[in-house]
């Protein structure tokens, strides 16, 4: 056995700032990443099993969803290969950890997705969830043993983003005026996130607000839809590409509120990024958002999911609260959800799971 076995993680931590923040905090608790970007390969696992105390998956559905959607046979073969890989891990005595970011594909799941997620669910010795709603779904709908589930809010890292440039300079660079209230939608732009709802709401606000939509569209057709809607709405700027951390920091600093008009959600790193930047949010009234934002009512306003008119009304109400009150409340929430605090329960479960002295569940 290797002297210092650690976690083998998929995907690589470089693929998302959430992963970098999570594993940095987890490492401070003694659970270090040993293999970053684990190949789903039986031979590799056999050769490196002595280095691995546990395997940790995030978004495992992308293992088979990366295949051409039209070639279901290729996707099926990938899922079968994953099943064999997980069976080998079990034979080698390596427990599997699954962070449940999604219970189904946001753009719609087919039978292969359900089979793949079911394999992961049954293989996991520990499931990490970001909300009580997801915990309830696992226990009630999928009959997962509650002892195998640990709740961990997504963390916030105030120091993650670079120091922003001035608000005036940022807005003038994108062709907007500092005189209007600035709203921001950011992140990977997927249909379930409701950017179209924000674009429909903006004309209802008159000439008082302007909107920036920043991020790479999930697919080209949705990108074209966003561009077409933006051309019809007043005071909108779209930046339909991957956004650097510096650019995101600038945009957050220039905004008066972040819009998260999601149609559904199990967890949102974008929410915690906004709070870490001390920016309040206007969000769809969904259980996850309620759970995270409950401690600081001044940090958020809620609207009826899917309703552009209700979103416009919520924006107006939220912006009537003084900026310093909204931002201070957001900052306090970010402190409450700092990574070293939220990760501790997970670290405890991983230590128990990987200990030779305590029986595994």
Image: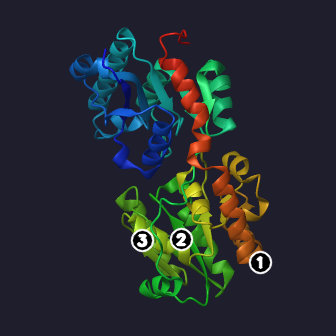
Is 193 situated above or below 108? below
At 40% from the left and 60% from the top, the residue drawn is: 217
Question: Which of the marked residues, 3 or 2, is nearer the chain's N terminus?
Answer: 3
**Callout 2: few (<14), some (14-19), or many (20+) C-alpha neighbours within 10 Å?**
many
> At which x and y percent is residue 42?
25, 19
> At which x and y percent is residue 81?
29, 22
> At which x and y percent is residue 245?
41, 64
Let me know if residue 100 appears in the view.
yes
The dot on residue 252 is 2
Write down the quadrant of residue 13 in the picture: top left
Answer with left or right where residue 256 lies relative to residue 121: right
Answer with left or right where residue 139 lies relative to residue 115: right
The answer for how far apart the CA atoms under marks 3 and 1 are is 27 Å
The answer for how far apart the CA atoms under marks 1 and 2 are is 19 Å
Answer with left or right where residue 94 lies relative to residue 103: left
Dot 3: what SS? helix
The dot on residue 247 is 3
**Callout 1: few (<14), some (14-19), or many (20+) C-alpha neighbours within 10 Å?**
few
Q: How is the image coloured?
A: rainbow
Write down the quadrant of residue 315 in the picture: bottom right
At 60% from the left and 67% from the top, the residue drawn is: 258
The dot on residue 320 is 1
The answer for how far apart the CA atoms under marks 3 and 2 are is 9 Å
Write down the quadrant of residue 182 in the picture: bottom right
Is 11 situated above or below 313? above
**Callout 3: few (<14), some (14-19), or many (20+) C-alpha neighbours within 10 Å?**
some
Which residue is more in the foreground, 23 or 199?
23
Is 292 situated above or below 8? below
Answer with left or right where residue 62 lies relative to residue 271: left
Dot 1: what SS? loop
Question: Which of the marked residues, 3 or 1, is nearer the chain's N terminus?
Answer: 3
At 60% from the left and 50% from the top, the residue drawn is: 338
């Amino acid at each position: 056995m290797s002297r210092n076995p650690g976690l083998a993680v998929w995907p690589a931590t470089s693929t998302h700032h959430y992963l970098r923040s999570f594993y940095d905090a987890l490492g401070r608790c003694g659970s270090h990443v040993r293999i970053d970007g684990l190949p789903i390969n039986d031979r590799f696992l056999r050769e490196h099993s002595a280095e691995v105390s546990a395997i940790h998956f995030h978004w495992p559905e992308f293992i088979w969803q990366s295949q051409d959607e039209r070639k279901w046979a290729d996707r099926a073969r990938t899922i079968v290969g994953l099943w064999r890989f997980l069976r080998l891990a079990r034979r080698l005595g390596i427990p599997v950890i699954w962070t449940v970011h999604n219970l189904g594909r946001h753009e719609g799941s087919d039978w292969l997705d359900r089979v793949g997620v079911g394999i992961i669910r049954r293989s996991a010795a520990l499931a990490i969830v970001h909300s009580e709603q997801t915990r309830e779904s696992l226990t009630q709908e999928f009959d997962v043993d509650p002892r195998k589930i640990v709740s961990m809010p997504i963390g916030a890292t105030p120091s993650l983003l670079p120091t922003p440039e001035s608000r005036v300079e940022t807005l003038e660079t994108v062709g907007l005026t500092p005189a209007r209230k600035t709203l921001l939608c950011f992140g990977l732009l997927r249909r379930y996130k409701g950017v179209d709802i924000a674009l429909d709401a903006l004309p209802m606000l008159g000439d008082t607000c302007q909107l920036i939509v920043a991020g790479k569209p999930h697919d080209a057709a949705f990108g074209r839809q966003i561009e077409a809607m933006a051309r019809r709405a007043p005071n909108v700027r779209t930046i339909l590409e991957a956004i650097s951390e510096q650019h995101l920091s600038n945009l957050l600093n220039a905004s008066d509120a972040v819009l998260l008009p999601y149609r559904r959600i199990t967890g949102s790193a974008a929410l915690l990024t906004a709070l870490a930047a001390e920016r309040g949010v206007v969000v769809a009234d969904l259980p996850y958002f309620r759970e995270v934002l409950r401690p600081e009512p001044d940090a958020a306003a809620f609207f009826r999911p899917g309703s552009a008119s209700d979103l416009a009304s919520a924006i107006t109400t939220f912006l009537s609260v003084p900026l310093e009150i909204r931002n201070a409340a957001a900052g306090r929430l970010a402190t409450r959800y700092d990574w070293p605090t939220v990760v501790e329960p997970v670290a405890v479960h991983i230590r128990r799971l990987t200990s030779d002295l305590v029986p595994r569940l």
